[in-house]
Amino acid sequence: MSMNNQGRPSAIPAGSAGFDGVTGTVTGNRGLQIEEPLIFEQDSAGRTGVDLPDVPKVATRLGAVKPRAKVGLPGLAEPQVVRHYTRLSQKNYAIDSGFYPLGSCTMKHNPRLNEKMARLPGFSDVHPMQPVSTVQGALELMDQLAYWLKTLTGMAAVTLAPAAGAHGEMCGIMAIRAAHEAKGDSGRTKILVPESAHGTNPATAAACGYSVDAIPATADGRVDLEALKAKLGPDVAGLMLTNPNTCGLFERDIVAIAEAVHAAGAYFYCDGANFNAIVGRVRPADLGIDVMHINLHKTFSTPHGGGGPGSGPVVFAESLAPYIPVPYVTHGRGGFALVENAGEGPAFGRMKAFHGQMGMFVRALSYMLSHGADGLWQASGDAVLNANYVMARLEDVMTASFEGPCMHECLFDDRFLKGTGVTTLDMAKALIDEGFHPMTMYFPLVVHGALLIEPTETESKASLDQFVDALRALAERAKSGDVAYFQAAPRLTPRRRLDETAAARKPVLRWTPPVPAEALAAD
Amino acid sequence: MRYLPLTEADRQSMLEAVRATSVEDLFRDVPKSARLAGPIGGLPNHMGELEVERLLGSLAAKNVPAGSVPSFLGAGAYRHHVPATVDHLVQRGEFLTAYTPYQPEVSQGTLQVLFEFQTQVALLTGMDVANASMYDGATSCAEAVMMANRVTRRKKAILSGGLHPHYRDVTTTDARFIGFEAVALPAAPTGGEDLLALVDDKTSCVVVQNPDVFGHVRDYTDLAAACQAKGALLIVVVTEALSLGLLTPPGDMGADIVAAEGQSFGNALNFGGPYVGLFAVKDKYVRQMPGRLCGETVDADGRRGFVLTLSTREQHIRREKATSNICTNSGLCALAFSIHVSLLGEAGITQLAQLNHAKAVQMADKLAAVPGVQVLNDGFFNEFTVKLPKPAAAVVEELARRRILGGVPVSRLYPGEMEDLLLVAVTETNTDADMDAFAAALTEVLA
């Protein structure tokens, strides 16, 4: 077998007489699934996919820096580049192609109107440092989005600066620290975080220099109010809580939780990752929350893009409203203005360059305008109804971790697989062969072998039924003892299970040019 | 509502299946006092596509697109021509609407793109390895400093006065809340800093920018060696990634970490975001890196494939012990970057970088000929600083009235300081006519 320079096979193990041992085809291709080499393996020196004007003949003015000899990029013509990325795209599962019930990720339909709006040259082709007189529409859009977010949450202030949800968490915890510091209260060293929290919560609190204290859950999957009260004291800066929580449940005691947190002189941070369950129906301010980030890429449908870009605006109650980062939009006499330097006001600092994820703001506002108050009411209602429907239809064959009603997602654990030899992971991989993206697995950590399903409101009943029918059949199959079937899944994907242990043990994180044969021989 | 597939009949039958009387009944765990009785007040009801287009179109029309006038703005965001292929490909639903590639069997597209992106970034910066991207250049810079703190187990960063003030502010904000020292030097519009003199046995890193915020290009080879001799790392920030197509890359100068903004490739100006942070390091620091990494491996049939790897550094596994709280990268912007770089290739990137530089040289000469204007830079890439006989902010406003976006006043970045300085950037999108119009208008405004 030929090996590449990283010591990994560069070709597929051969079968008989030139036919590939895996696919049975000559090429290793399988109909619409076409093997695609790395872009670096398609190089021809001098070839390019752009035609540029000639460079004017002037003497370079590079000071003491020398021009570089070479970068090492491959040369391809435009049609090759188009085909490369088109083929790669076909190896991805996506919400456009199918059901994507990743719990706590809110994989809802991404409307193309939003893409069209974000590409209007008046938004996409505007430089962040243009004179404010030439960007009044951009500032007005940010102001409009801020109005919608404040209205939907009932909060007093908002910053649009953070680039993602975790970045919003950082911003919120910084605001809490700034508020305590402003009061001269330096004895608060702890942030309380429930065991069911997203990993970003403890990571954020720790990054901001706080120690993290975990709050246990009750048997019904919610924060243990008495345990929380016992941990509250003058050393606690705040509580970080996701609501609805990551078990898909609404924290029934939330008002009492907020009161207890406030009575202890601490602030109440809500992780807004699951805001889609309640948007347009419940205002977080009415629950006693002081600060919350909102993932525009979840609740407000901006595309996930294979892992970003996100956008994580943060809303603040009156108590924390003075502690926001720059920049923010103000209403001046001559129109909208921008406060963009810390030190010009009470702002605590800056989170990223320029003014936030403008491209995401346009998309989110386009989504909000499309839904309106009535559409958001219906959307959160349908999201919750869909999740409860999935839960009801699976309860008898799988093990729901907690009693319903759930909110926008439903949680199962692996008790139904006990004794079958089939794991949550195997179940997920078998679902892939059925044409579904798996649910979130092994999260939250509070139940064993978690399977967290979030259908969202943009799935039809037919789509839910198809998924449920497949999952029911797989659950039955697992119970019938057909372990081998699950352990070999997935079979029908462009790649089968990948060796993640090998990848981590000896990381190969980039392509490197092949070593010439003569150099190898000289070794 | 066009995005909601459930019919009223569906809802009724589903409510029966879940044994609830109404949708409101499913919200019974929410305290009654916090449940709204109906759609929230103060907001309009739903709109059709046409109405949304009209409304947002009217807001867009209140802005002056940079491409509609001669435009010379830079300062960390650059207007380059993006080939049509880029935007077509990033809008393929399989890229646009996929999540983070946590299920590698059905995410090989995104994963291979990330592996190629990491390689492109490593090649451009001259470094060993790169991650799968950060939020933007400024957050990348702050993360680089925190990584240097981890590597050296020291807690003091020295920030050059040539570092973009937004990058400086993001880093000092993190320093305040996360708990390390960031010594930011005063702005250095003509250079002349003695950074090495500030490096002591508590210094984790020195952060320089190349080209710096005033456009100066420098060779940091000696500084890199001197920092390392004192046990500190050299972090090189790059805000104009296209400069890497022409200049000796930071890796060849001996940089330990490169933190860069990648917007110049494939990404529109977008009023400042979303952009794509680049992050590249020497091999020996890989396990201290923040952010996602994609690595090569094999599947159960022995075929080459890709996975997210070394995730034991990350928050979803390590929680409060993670190297960073970062969760997302800038996936789609990284894809746009990667496609643009692939289209350019070795020949294209070299020519594009040379073109930018040559045009900037021409523009500098034209502006230097305007009475009262002085160019401050000896060496630059596609951006330089000019000294004006009048406050730059007022000049820029006056130019805007003449429908020319004539650069970024330095006082916009440093309030109350250096009011006579103007940053001017030139790219391949500026025609000879644009450059002549700018010089002529500036002559008029200064007369």
Image: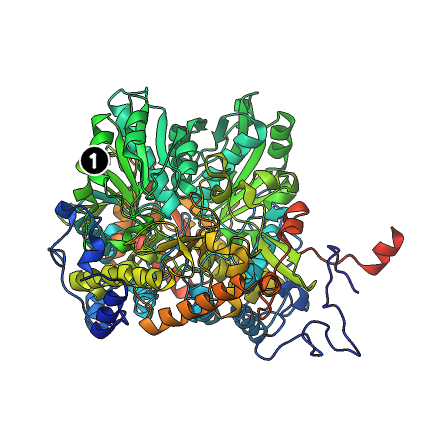
What residue is rendered at 21% in x and 45% in y? A284
Q: Residue A55 appears at what percent x and percent y?
A: 55, 63
Q: Residue B6 appears at what percent x and percent y?
A: 26, 71
A43 sits left or right of A273 in the view: right
Which one is nearer the viewer's eye here, A417 or A462? A417
A129 sits left or right of B207 in the view: left
What residue is rendered at 24% in x and 22% in y? A183
Q: Quadrant of the N terminus of chain A?
A: bottom right
Q: What crowding class fits label 1: few (fewer than 14 Cα within 10 Å), some (14-19), or many (20 or more)?
A: few
What residue is rendered at 22% in x and 61% in y? B20
Look at the image and tell me whether residue B369 can be seen: no
A120 sits left or right of A101 in the view: left
Residue designated by label 1: A256
Q: Quadrant of residue A308?
A: bottom left
Which one is nearer the viewer's eye here, A422 or A23? A422
Relative height, residue B231 to residue B304 (above, below): above
Q: Quadrant of residue B67?
A: bottom left
